[in-house]
Image: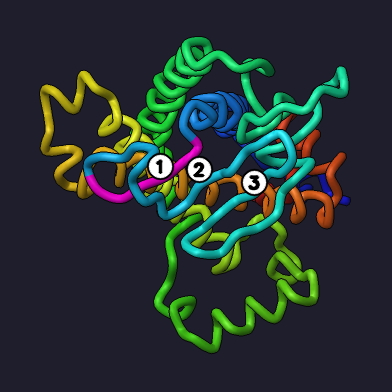
Amino acid sequence: MNERNRIKPLIKHRLTTRLWHWINATCVLVMVMSGLTVFNAHPRLYWGEYGANDDHAWAAVGSSQTVGYVRIGETKIDTTGFIGNWRDSDGNVQTWAFPGWATIPSYYSLAEGRLWHFFFAWLFSFSIAIFMIRSLFNRHVKQDLHITRGEWRPSHIWQDVKNHARLRFHAPGDANIYNILQKFSYIGVIFILLPLMIFTGLAMSPAMDANWPVLTDILGGRQSARSIHFIGMSLLVLFFVVHMAALLLAGPLKETWAMITGGRREGHRDA
């Protein structure tokens, strides 16, 4: 091949993208696990400003020495052995809502759980802010996540749904272009779900609530903020599960290595 006409490979993932990815992955993992420790202190969710044991909870984890269950509305799901009633590494029955392997720390400590949660929440908030500012300059959103008029067509969206059902996740011949479902999910998570998690987290802070009560007023009350925060966490876990499933189907070693080293993709041809 003529040296002049050789195609130069390009970095698939920029260094800033890789750093942001791994920092956020670490932060989200720690925040979810430490958040479950905080939730274990009172495993019930309410709507409104107040909530206590005698108030009706729209969702709760029930615990006793013999059974464990999750209740959503009037629907009760038996979770004995997994949630609400489980055995620790020594074989002893524990009745915290979520088991030690799913929490940070692995033992029950509300104070330590909060310390872990708040530290990584602030780190995560700064990471998101830097990402959004940088995205304005490197045109990442416009180039990679912008949804064109044609992609909004129901027929196009439905075709992408069918492609996903057939395990076809990329455009033919170009694995670097996000499809419409990927764009929807990334935009929803980065620009809606994650800011909502930060906002509801701030609204639950006693200091923020005392100085800016309008935060909880917007959300309908401090307990409503807690419920929305927990729902958002559940959606993040769902996104993670789907993300990992797609990674396994696309080739986990190759894709993970690309996110560590940058990877290579087809670039432009020398003039």
In this rendering, the label closer to the viewer, 3 or 1: 1
- Mark 2 or 3 closer to N-term? 2
**Which residue is denoted by mark 2 in the rendering?**
233
Residue located 57% across and 67% down the image = 181
Cα–Cα gap, marks 2 and 3: 11 Å
Asked which quadrant contains residue 24, the reply is top right
Q: Where does the magenta region start and end?
A: 43-48
Mark 3 residue type: Phe
- Asked if the residues shown at circle 2 and circle 3 are in contact, with their CB atoms under 8 angstroms apart, the answer is no
Queried whether the magenta region covers residue 24, the answer comes back as no
- Asked if the residues shown at circle 2 and circle 1 are in contact, with their CB atoms under 8 angstroms apart, the answer is yes
In this rendering, the label closer to the viewer, 2 or 3: 2
Residue located 14% across and 44% down the image = 217
- Mark 3 or 1 closer to N-term? 1
Tag 2's secondary structure?
Answer: helix
* 271, 105: nearer the viewer: 105
**Which residue is denoted by mark 3 in the rendering?**
240
**Which residue is denoted by mark 1 in the rendering?**
229
Identity of the residue furthest to the bottom in this view: 155
Residue 114 vs 44, above or below: the answer is: above
